[in-house]
Image (cartoon, helix red, strand yellow):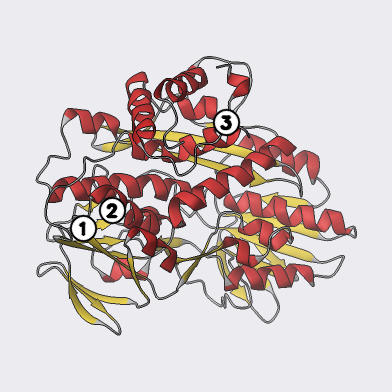
Amino acid sequence: MKADAIDRRSLLRTSIATGAAALASTSARAQQNAYHVVVAGGGFAGATTAKYLRLWGGGLIRVTLVDPKPDHYSCIMSNLVIEGSLPLSAIRFPLSALGVYGVNYVQDRVNGVDAQKRLVRFARGGWQTYDRLVLAGGISFRPVQGLDSSKAPHGWIAGSQTRILKSQIATMPDNGTYILTIPRSPYRCPPGPYERACAVAAILKARGGKARVIVLDANPGIQAAAKTFGAAFANLYPNIITYVPNAWLLSADMTTKTVTTSAGKFSGDVLNIIPRQRASSLVRGAGVVPSGSYFAPVDPLSYESTLPGYSGIHIIGDSQGTSQPKSGHMANAQAKICADAVIRLFQGQAIDDAARVASVTTNSACFSPITLSEASWLTASFAYDPATKAMKLMPGSLAESGRWSISNYRDMKSWSKNLWADTFK
Amino acid sequence: LAGEGYFDLRDEMLDMMRPSETGEIMKHQAKGYTAAQVDLIASFFASLQSKAVSGGGK
């Protein structure tokens, strides 16, 4: 078959599922529901883990998925909601849908973990036993003096924040100023803030007028797909976007709509403040983030905590502390490695034999809308390095499109659709 | 992909691994995998039951 004859949708689906394929476990022959895994958090990481524990576990594992919110709102494609090309309902995924695989979704909040006794406390449901606990709580934000995120939204956890930001941008004056603050790395979705800047600039450009976008980046430069976003800022939106590197956010004033940064004070009509990030309160509360750290140290062969006294607790997605980028696609890949490891451990199998170690691979693809009809892409793959016991970027795998196109926009739709289907359906 | 032929799946992925002047995302994704892994991936999807095997249309 010629390369140009390949069904593009199939290719994108392949990329999403590759982490799974090499790791697929043999079916279990043991007693049905012999083990109980509690998965806390129903985002890309948690939903994928819950689903694949059931798919690959051969009925060996009873899976409880717990999250206070019955629906997950996908950050992926949320900029299209802000632009108005997708309704908010298009990025909403009910967690109860995983019931088709036998996942038991419980609407509750985890507010206590006893790692020694392997007990987890649900706010309403009390203490529950578990054999293994998977924490997939995503991110939480570090405090910013003066910030009220209901007035200066981050839009970095989708849902109500997406709605607030969309509304504020929609009602911004034609000559208004939109200010975006980007936190120091690491943060969720490395290309995301620059994508956000382009998405908002595209809205303002289409509207006409003289509205401006000021990007205040705490980092010394664009953190991902620098060639693509740099070109978009300079060539597509030269009169709209002003990019300011090394601008640390120090405080914010909700009354005057002013941010104070290491690069000076800036006032605007819409403040889109993305604070610095750390592991979610769920993960920190479980004790798996050491003092002085912001994310949870894990073994990338299983995503089990490496802290003494916390065996049986796995941390995946944006809360874990490996060097892999924090993204929904990456969380989906990590979830499959975690699910495979949990199944093998229940079956008494090794997770560090040569064949498995050689197959522990993750990847992340990311498409970004650059205009209202064109997108760019960024991709990277990681493999387990036995020498350092860490995930290592595969040579030559880090690449960006460097340009934007309508066909990339089509691929973006396929990519998100397949990633959502693999995760939430 | 579930239930599609092993050889088709394998060859499509090996195609992606070949050098090309086109800046397609899958060319770069393919760099993350060895030929042995591609073989495992093709075997995995070929072993799955398909809900509805299409005629290969887009």
The reply to whether callout 1 and callout 2 are in contact (CB within 8 Å) is: yes
What residue is at 60 percent from the left and 38 percent from the top? A377
- The reply, left or right, for residue A131 in relation to residue A143 is left
Disc assigned to residue A61: 1
Looking at the image, which residue is at 64% across and 79% down?
A254
**Badge 2: few (under 14), some or many (20 or more) residues near its Cα, within 10 Å?**
many
Residue A222 seen by the camera: no
Expressed as whole percent of the image width and height from the top left, the position of residue A396 reads 47, 24
Pointers 3 and 1 within a single chain: no
The residue at the point 33 percent across, 54 percent down is A49
Badge 2 amino acid: Leu
Q: Count residues near mark 1 (Cα–Cα under 10 Å), then give few for <14, some for 14-19, many for 20+.
A: many
Residue A181's place in the image compared with A58, above or below, is below
To which residue does mark 3 refer? B56
Mark 3 residue element: loop
Q: Amino acid at mark 3?
A: Gly
Residue A76 x/y as whole percent: 56, 54
Q: Residue A409 vs residue A158: left or right?
A: right
On residue A273, the disc is none
